[in-house]
Amino acid sequence: MSKFSGLLGSKKINSRHSTMTEDAKLLISIADAEESVTKIVLGVVKNVSGGKPHLKFNAIPAGFSVKVRGLGDVQEVFIYTKNPNVPASLQEAFDRKK
């Protein structure tokens, strides 16, 4: 897990939680580059066991919540956008960089 760095200190990122998992950091850097994403909010990190890294998208009124699963942790990230194609493009870019 890492703390906020200058790299991810963009105007789009808003959070009371400054810790992010490595997989969430990758997703956030991809989402930050998306023009249609207006805001990114980090959720808490939970330690879990088992399972494979993946993304799970859920629609919310302002965009999407994404559960970012790593090897030993899960972090929820909220991505604000009006573009319904954002989850597919984020998933594709995430899979390419993993």
Image (cartoon, rainbow, N blue to C red):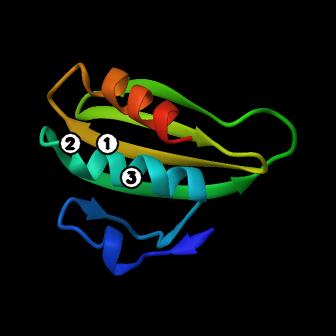
- C-alpha gap between disc 2 and disc 1: 11 Å
Please, what is the three-letter code of the amino acid marked with disc 3?
A: Ile
Q: Position of residue 90 (x, y in %)?
A: 36, 33
Tell me the mark number nearer the camera, choosing from 2 and 1: 2
Foreground pick, 15 / 70: 70
Q: Tell me what residue is drawn at x 52 percent, y 46 percent.
A: 76
**Is 11 located above or below residue 65 in the figure?**
below
Q: Are marks 1 and 3 in contact (CB under 8 Å)?
A: no
Q: Are marks 2 and 1 in contact (CB under 8 Å)?
A: no
Please give left or right for residue 10 compared with residue 30 in the image: left
Please give left or right for residue 27 compared with residue 70 in the image: left
**Is 62 located above or below residue 20 in the figure?**
above
Q: Tell me what residue is drawn at x 87 percent, y 38 percent.
A: 50
Tag 1's secondary structure? strand
- C-alpha gap between disc 1 and disc 3: 9 Å
Foreground pick, 42 / 53: 53
Give the crowd class for mark 3: few <14, some 14-19, many >=20 residues within 10 Å: many
Q: Determine which residue is flagged by label 3.
A: 28
Q: Quadrant of the C terminus?
A: top right
Q: Position of residue 89 (x, y in %)?
A: 32, 26
Please, what is the three-letter code of the amino acid marked with disc 1?
A: Ile
Sequence-wise, which precedes: disc 2 or disc 1?
2
Q: Determine which residue is flagged by label 1.
A: 79
